[in-house]
């Protein structure tokens, strides 16, 4: 996802910083300033990367946009919201700790749910390769990037975001 947004926004190559890879620039000439951070931590430690980056960049919490997988949405569905519950998502729990609050924007990317509630099966499912055809996965990435772009433009303009 970060690679797709970096390509669309023509950001420079990412540099290692904040226990992750970060690329900074603008969405377009005169557009909102952005930084895309891909933590190089385990998912359940992503807040250890995002928290220090936010502090260094002096980014208000309501301008942080996190793109994450969501097993509670069917594959292919993309939704965004400000804040909300953590739904047992270890990456979101870590971000809550690292940012000091769950009140950040989320682009929730539906990956569907396996036919089991066994934690090991669910973990293997979300950490494994997509089972859907490549064109459907590419469409999902494109739709999630579209939503992230709309959200960033709305936040950058200072307008209330319409869902």
Image (tube, helix red, strand yellow):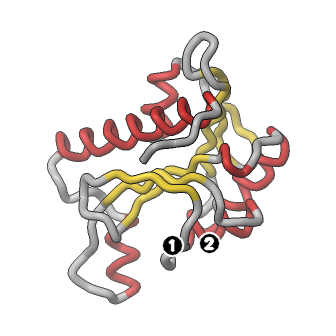
The residue depicted at 25 percent of the width and 52 percent of the height is 76
- Rendering coords of residue 138 (x, y %): 26, 39
Q: Which mark is residue 89?
A: 1
In the figure, is residue 9 to the left or right of 57? left
- Residue that extends furthest to the bottom in the rendered view of this protein: 118
Residue located beneath label 2 in the image: 93
As drawn, 19 above or below 129:
above
Cα–Cα span, label 1 and label 2: 6 Å
The residue depicted at 75 percent of the width and 41 percent of the height is 17
Helix, strand or loop status at disc 2? helix
Helix, strand or loop status at disc 1? loop
Q: Quadrant of the N terminus?
A: top left
- Rendering coords of residue 158 (x, y %): 64, 33
As drawn, 108 above or below 126:
above
Q: Between residues 41 and 53, which one lies in front from this camera angle? A: 53
Q: Between residues 147 and 47, which one lies in front from this camera angle? A: 147
Are dots 1 and 2 in contact, CB under 8 Å? yes
Within-10-Å neighbours for mark 2: few <14, some 14–19, many 20+: many
Q: Which mark is residue 107?
A: none
The residue depicted at 46 percent of the width and 51 percent of the height is 107
Within-10-Å neighbours for mark 1: few <14, some 14–19, many 20+: some
- Rendering coords of residue 99 (x, y %): 74, 60
As drawn, 92 above or below 78:
below
As drawn, 48 above or below 86:
above
């Amino acid at each position: 996802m970060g690679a797709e947004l970096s390509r669309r926004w023509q950001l420079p190559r990412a540099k290692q910083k904040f226990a992750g890879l970060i690329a900074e620039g603008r969405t377009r000439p005169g557009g909102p300033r952005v930084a895309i951070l891909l933590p190089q931590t385990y998912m359940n430690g992503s807040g250890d990367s995002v928290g220090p980056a936010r502090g260094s960049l002096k980014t208000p919490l309501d301008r942080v946009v996190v793109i994450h997988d969501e097993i509670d949405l069917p594959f292919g569905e993309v939704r965004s919201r400000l804040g909300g519950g953590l739904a047992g998502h270890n990456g979101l729990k870590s971000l809550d700790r690292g940012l000091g609050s769950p009140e950040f924007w989320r682009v929730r990317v539906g990956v569907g749910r396996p036919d089991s509630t066994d934690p090991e099966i669910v973990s293997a499912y979300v950490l494994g390769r997509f089972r859907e055809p490549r064109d459907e996965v590419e469409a999902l990435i494109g739709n999630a990037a579209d939503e992230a772009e709309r959200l960033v433009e709305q936040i950058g303009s200072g307008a209330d975001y319409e869902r």
